Image: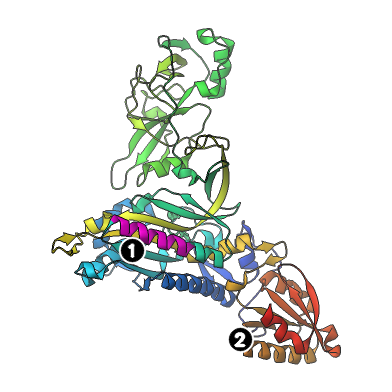
């Protein structure tokens, strides 16, 4: 492969584009890999397409090595199968729907569980056809509320989605293990430093599930790790250990006048000032904060829900959404319409709306909380005595230093990451929906169980850029770089001819070469562009050509070596 910059569709930008905030987005735009074409939709320029295809190739190779077979579905699909599975509504606002000229409803698929289950139903009849893993690399559509950061969160993006079909739960666990190993190989080849964390299943349904998170400060996911054991989980999936029930008998519920204390801080200050219940050691952790949210159930009526968390913790809206999925929630603000909900003074006792409490609110715990009257709070409001929550909910923020839910000895640390892959043991949700049965060895029908495994192919391009760049530009790992060598003709015509000659030899030796043969572009601009574009090796054909030398530069280390032009192919094929 030989690419000539003199004729290539490429324009690098000197300035940071205003639309880009995160490094990967900024650099992919500046170095001429992508252009924005639509809200959440990007055009891949020649360099970008090469990188995208390289990522897809790595994914395909590892899927094939793991025994998965590639197929390809349309993205434009009829409503029916998604109606049958319930996802037409469960997926909520994120699904793109449309109608054809006959008013028949379609969707642009966010993932393809339904279609793969139907394909297997169509083409298999006996246990002998199993196990089986199928996959595709295909464009997905999601009406993301906030498309952002270029390729990191698009509304149209490339995904590899694989689906396993097994007849037993053990078979599913094996397939899941095989895909997990394949993913580790894929991300190692892409040069993505990542952590595998326990995850929530989300709108896909199912049970066991893990995410592969590429470490990056700009990642939208936060995850915890334990300093003492190997626990790692998306903060959405952290399960708070319930503390033991407290000993002793709390006093009776007492209502106090607490004017002008709509916030936890003002309440704690007043409680200490007035020595409520004879105490002056009140802290936010002694208070129970009750937050009202509106829950939007897919296809249903909105519901008001109160959530009680210890007052020293905020509600984490991502954890709340994950806990309520497929429903979503937003903070309720229209207190004028609900005089029974006294803003700032809400208590769980006698709640008129559904009330879910943090797992720390165990029976016997006593709280300082709202008295459901303006300007009044109550002390010794005891869970199990004065109020009984309708259940627990994981909605409180997780903090660094919280005890590890697994070993309870270590403290949790928190980091950020980009979700690059997600693997699920789905179980029979979809095969049940389609009544997919095959004939078992004993002549009785068996219902296959499914796994689903996604890699964000286009997102991975950005994740790699996020992890592999410096202040001068991109630094691609060799496996997915758009070329192996960037030959820069850094002077007059003779050097262009020599550069093209060398490029030809490198191509003949099996290397992928980008040659900067642009006329009328200064050597300085060419060097800057080479660093911005980020191909692993650069050969400068310039000043020392007269002595028979070129300069070999290593993009990652910055190392520079004078190498005889006649030795250049050997130098680059042995690195
Ligand atoms: P997120 O939480 O980031 O929205 P998700 O949980 O919705 O991701 P999955 O449904 O598991 O993602 O999709 C499989 C993979 O597809 C993800 O791991 C991610 O790498 C990729 N992906 C999901 N949504 C997007 C998007 N909007 N743009 C680019 N890639 C995406
Ligand atoms: Mg999503």
The numbered mark, 2 or 1, whose residue comes first in the sequence reads 1
Answer left or right for 376 relative to 93: right
Residue 124: quadrant of the picture? bottom left
> Which residue does the image show at 72% across and 61% down from the upper left?
471
On screen, residue 323 above or below 79: above
Question: In this figure, which residue is indicated by the disc labeled 1?
Answer: 164
Query: Marks 2 and 1, how far apart in space?
Result: 37 Å
Going by the image, does 302 lie left or right of 123? right
Determine crowd level at label 1: few under 14, some 14-19, many 20+ residues with C-alpha closer than 10 A.
Answer: many
- The residues colored magenta run 169-183
* Residue under numbered circle 2: 510
Q: Within 10 angstroms of label 2, few (less than 14), some, or many (20 or more) residues?
A: few
In reply to whether residue 178 is colored magenta, the answer given is: yes
Res 557 quadrant in image: bottom right
Relative to the observer, which residue lies in front, 209 or 344? Answer: 209
- Quadrant of the image where one finds ligand 2: bottom left
- What residue is rendered at 74% in x and 77% in y? 526
Residue 427 in view in this figure? yes
Q: Nearer the viewer, residue 573 or 363?
A: 573
Quick check: is 50 in the magenta stretch? no
Residue 140, image quadrant:
bottom left
Checking the image for residue 347, the label placed there is: none
Q: How far from the left and from the top, in percent, is residue 278?
A: 53, 7
Helix, strand or loop under label 2: loop
Q: Are marks 2 and 1 in contact (CB under 8 Å)?
A: no
Q: Residue farthest to the top?
A: 278
> In the shown orientation, is residue 44 left or right of residue 144?
right
- Whether residue 519 is visible to the viewer of this picture, yes or no, is no
């Amino acid at each position: 492969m030989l690419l000539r910059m003199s004729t290539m569709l490429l324009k690098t930008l000197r300035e940071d584009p205003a639309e880009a905030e995160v490094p990967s987005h900024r650099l992919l735009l500046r170095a001429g890999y992508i252009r924005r074409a639509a809200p959440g939709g990007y055009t891949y320029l020649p360099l970008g397409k090469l990188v995208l295809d390289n990522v897809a190739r790595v994914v395909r190779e590892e899927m094939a090595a793991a025994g998965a077979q590639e197929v390809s579905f349309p993205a434009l699909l009829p409503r029916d199968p998604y109606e049958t599975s319930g996802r037409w509504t469960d997926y909520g606002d994120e699904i793109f729907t449309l109608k054809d000229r006959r008013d028949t409803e379609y969707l642009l698929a966010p993932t393809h569980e339904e279609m793969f289950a139907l394909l297997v139903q169509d083409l298999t009849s006996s246990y002998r056809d199993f196990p089986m893993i199928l996959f595709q690399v295909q464009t997905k559509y999601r009406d993301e509320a906030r498309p952002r950061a270029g390729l990191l969160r698009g509304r149209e993006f490339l995904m590899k989605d694989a689906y396993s079909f097994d007849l037993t739960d053990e078979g599913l666990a094996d397939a899941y293990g095989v895909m997990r190993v394949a993913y580790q190989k894929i991300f190692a080849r892409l040069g993505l430093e990542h952590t595998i964390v326990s995850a929530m299943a989300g709108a896909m349904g199912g049970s066991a599930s893990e995410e592969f998170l590429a470490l990056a400060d700009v990642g939208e996911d936060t995850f915890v790790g334990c300093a003492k054991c190997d626990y790692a989980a998306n903060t959405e999936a952290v399960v708070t250990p319930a503390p033991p029930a407290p000993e002793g008998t709390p006093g009776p519920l007492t209502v106090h006048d607490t004017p002008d204390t709509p916030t936890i801080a003002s309440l704690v200050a007043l409680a200490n000032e007035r020595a409520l219940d004879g105490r002056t050691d009140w802290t936010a952790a002694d208070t129970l904060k009750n937050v009202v949210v509106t829950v939007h159930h897919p296809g249903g009526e909105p519901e008001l829900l109160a959530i009680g968390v210890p007052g020293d913790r905020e509600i984490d809206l991502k954890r709340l959404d994950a806990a309520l999925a497929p429903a979503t929630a937003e903070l309720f603000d229209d207190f004028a319409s609900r005089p029974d909900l006294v803003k700032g003074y809400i208590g769980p006792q006698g709640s008129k709306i559904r009330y879910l409490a943090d797992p720390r609110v165990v029976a016997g715990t006593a709280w300082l909380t709202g008295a459901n009257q303006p300007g009044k709070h109550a002390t010794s409001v005891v869970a199990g005595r004065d109020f009984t929550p309708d259940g627990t909910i994981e909605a409180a923020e997780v903090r660094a230093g919280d005890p590890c839910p697994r070993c309870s000895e270590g403290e949790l640390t928190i980091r950020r990451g980009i979700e690059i892959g997600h693997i699920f043991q789905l179980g029979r949700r979809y095969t049940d929906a389609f009544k997919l049965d095959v004939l078992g060895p004993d002549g009785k029908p068996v219902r296959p169980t499914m796994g689903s495994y996604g890699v964000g192919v286009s997102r991975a391009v950005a994740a790699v850029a996020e992890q592999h760049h410096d202040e001068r530009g991109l630094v691609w790992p060799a496996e997915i770089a758009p070329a192996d060598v960037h030959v820069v003709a850094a002077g007059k015509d003779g050097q262009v001819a020599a550069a093209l000659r060398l490029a030809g030899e490198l191509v003949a030796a099996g290397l992928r070469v980008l040659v900067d043969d642009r006329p009328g572009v200064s050597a300085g601009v060419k060097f800057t562009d080479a660093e911005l574009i980020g191909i692993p090796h650069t050969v400068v054909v310039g000043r020392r050509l007269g002595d028979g030398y070129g300069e070999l530069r290593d993009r990652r280390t910055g190392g520079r070596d004078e190498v005889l032009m006649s030795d250049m192919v050997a130098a680059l094929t042995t690195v």
